[in-house]
Image: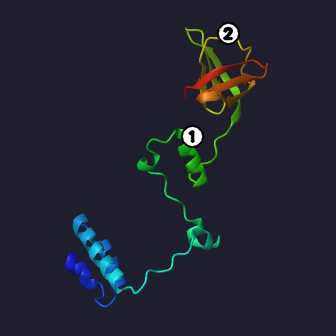
Amino acid sequence: MVLGTLCRASASDPLSRLLACRDISDATARLTCFDRETAALAAASPAPPLALPAAAVHVPSSSPAATAPRPPLDAQQQFGLPERTVARKEVAAGLRSTDAAKIQAHIAGVSTQPDGRTVFRLDNDQTWRQLLAEGDLLSRVGDVVTISRGALGSYWLQVATGRGCKVTRVR
């Protein structure tokens, strides 16, 4: 397979020989081919190409490189990073929209669990449950609720009466 790939590449064109290495399916043979061809290119090159600083390179906004989607962060790039850092990197890369600080919805249903915690079913198909049984929030079906982010990943639900409680999303 290696010989067939290299035979298709022009013997006089080192770049086509290097690109032909991509077609080799065996990983060891492919790496050997790349090593051999890049060594030949380096030996044939009189001087290394001039590298421009990143700030000097301008990519027009209409070019395909400017509009091409960036690949998502892979598992190795995410390893050990807090979720907020991963989210911030994905937002910067255009892979994730910015997180909402709060949402508003209408109560579609209210129920109380046997342990006294209230469950709120909203008109946006989300379901939220009180973290602690804190008593009646004086909420009714149709009322507007606001759920906002709290400290340390918590969420606060506030009903139209002004009363509120910490909640967790169930669905």
Residue 58 visible in the current orientation: no
Q: Earlier in the sequence, mark 2 or mark 1?
A: 1
Q: Nearer the viewer, residue 141 or 120?
A: 120
Residue lying furthest front in this view?
Answer: 47
Quadrant containing the N terminus in the rendered view: bottom left
Colour scheme employed for the rendering of this structure: rainbow
Q: At 49% across and 42% down in the image, what residue appears?
A: 81
Image: 21 above or below 142 = below
Q: At 78% across and 22% down in the image, what residue appears?
A: 160
Image: 103 above or below 132 = below
Q: CA distance from mark 2 to mark 1?
A: 33 Å
The quadrant in which residue 53 appears is: bottom right
Q: In screen coordinates, is 73 left or right of 63?
A: left
Q: At 65% across and 18% down in the image, what residue appears?
A: 110
Q: In screen coordinates, is 19 left or right of 169?
A: left
Quadrant containing the C terminus in the rendered view: top right
Q: Nearer the viewer, residue 104 or 111?
A: 104
Residue at mark 1: 84
